[in-house]
Image (tube, helix red, strand yellow):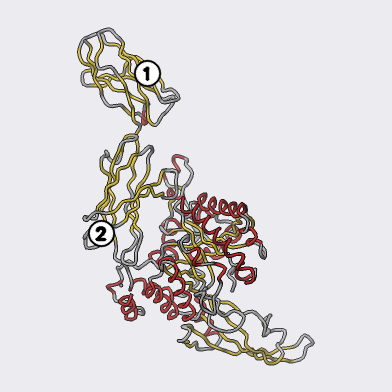
Amino acid sequence: MVRKFRVATALAICAAICISLPVSWADNQPRTIVSGWIPYYSVKTVMPFIKKIPSTTAAILGAPVTCEANEYSPEDLALLNSSYLYANKDLMKEVMPFWFTLKSPTIIRNDYTTGNPSWPMADTLCLMRKTGLKIIPTITDGTDKLVLASYLAKSEIRGTIVTSIVDLVNKNGFDGIDLDFEGFAFVDGNTTWAKTAPNWVLFIRELSTQLHLSQKLLSVTAPYAFNPSEKQKGYTVYAWADIAASIDRLRIMTYDYSVAKPGPIGPISWTEKTLKYAISIMPASKVFIGLPGYGRDWITSIVGTCPTSAPPGLTKSAKAATFKMSYATAKAAIDQAVPVFDEKNSEATYSYVKTFNGLTPKGSATSCVVSRTVWYQNERSFTERMNLVAQYRLGGAALWTLGMEDAGATTAMRNVALAIAPDIVTSQLTIQNSEANQVSYGDIFLLNGLLTFNDKSPVAELAVSIEMKRANEITWTKIAESTTDRDGAISVPITLAESAAFRMRTEGTWERAESVSNEQNVSVRPKITINHPSSIRRGDPIEVKGFVLPRTSGASVIIQRMIAGKWQNGATSSLTDFNGEFVLKASQSERGVITMRIQVGNGAQTFYSQEFSVVVR
């Protein structure tokens, strides 16, 4: 189907517990090794459409409803938390919305609205983001034969496509992009591959550079390939070895082995062979095995003449019918068949016969006997393929499509994920050199982090990313890196010009789980810099100059004096100019020391300079 539609130890553990886990595993965090595509037409399969309600604060202020400001009714929250995506988010680190089609260098069609015209994409993305999963949408090739190949052959057009994709990612706050350009493989013809491949490699390198500048991920989805030294090479046009250093994910479509003729969807030996080649040329953590959530039903023979009342399309040359894995058990019952497990291919299969009696178009009695064969993957198939993830320490599995598998297959994936669960890392972030997480503009404060395992022992020599998100931003941006010391601690100095939230993130490894710390919000109060005389003669004016950071024009400024233990306003006031600067004058008729400060603004937006003293002699 062209798609539009600890190793030995881990294996030993998995063999023992993949079918039924002891209760002691229940509280463990599974390894996040599941991902999958969410086509625009099946969003409802994995999550409900629920109406967002502005938070009380947003409603009072009349502010636009952002994702963070959404509230949901208890009934909607229960529905949301029971949905496939939310119930299984602990198995995942990312999802691939299958929503976009490249139509030209400047046009990327949004197919989401076709399947969901009454539900805004922003609302769906909001619900997805609340899972904490990375969102890496897929773009397919929607051009005609050889068109995309001709685009990539021209440097300027390649650059335009790169810009279009990067703009799509950044505009929507996606975490990256997944390319599913299948036309090269299944439409253009293999005689074009030698010419297309070098241009494809250039395109991937150029796109990777631009995405990585924005800390975005590049994923490539491709059909199988084998070691080029072997007789059967697979789809060499995707040049895995040449793009390996540029991509972050390779999702291999280890399915559609049998399409025109009856046979397994993706034999396990064939699957393992392409995985072995992939991990020989790139880190195994980049490689994802494709899992089909569908099966096929082929017609193998027709004896007799089928009546007009028979289902349409009953011909030996008819394409195989496709069905969801979640329907397989019910289908077998309807077909009055008992599936068997083919151990060689690691798939379920059965054959059955249907007889149709009725009339010909001319009214004569007739009948036909239709023989059919079915193949699909089941719970055991998924277990054995997830064991390959464990054996080769792969990045994980990618499901076409997410949520089409049956409950048993989902459980099988969870069991393996638990059996190879990594050590949990706890990450705690605190703020130092601040007053109630409030700092003055430009002042230095410290982000202190402590990373420990569950037993409270420190995680030493661990790379930590510091991420920041401003109030008007929806995505986190990495701003600094550090490495934990022997006590599992880091300390990073920060200066800030505007309020922002901070968190720490560590990447997962095979031994350790990814971690994300608590968030700390730091607010920034303006800073007043002043220049004043230290002493004056009695009767001379006291001239105070200064400026407000961040530079603010038109702000009310006044001198205040401390008199009898209370601050009192001076007689004159001023406004900051376009550079945020101001000049104030005051006088003092008596000798002594006067204590003063500058007040900027009024009401809730009032702030003050540090106190200063002037000697009047």
SS for dot 1: strand
> For this view, does 337 lie left or right of residue 527?
right
Disc on res. 583? 1
Front in this rendered view, residue 605 or 266: 266
**Outermost residue to the front:** 229
For the C terminus, the image quarter is top left
The amino acid beneath tag 2 is Val
Look at 28% across and 43% down and name the residue there.
446
Query: Taking the image as drawn, is residue 87 in sight?
Result: no
Front in this rendered view, residue 364 or 64: 64
The amino acid beneath tag 1 is Val
Q: How many labels does the image show?
A: 2
Q: Residue 314, relative to residue 167: is it above or below?
A: below
Q: Which class describes the residues within 10 Å of circle 1: few (<14), some (14-19), or many (20+)?
A: some
Q: Where is residue 481 in the image (x, y as percent from the top left)?
A: 34, 50
Query: Taking the image as drawn, is residue 396 in sight?
Result: yes
Disc on res. 208? none
- Distance from Cα at disc 2 to Cα at disc 1: 54 Å
Disc on res. 459? 2
Look at 43% across and 71% down and name the residue there.
280
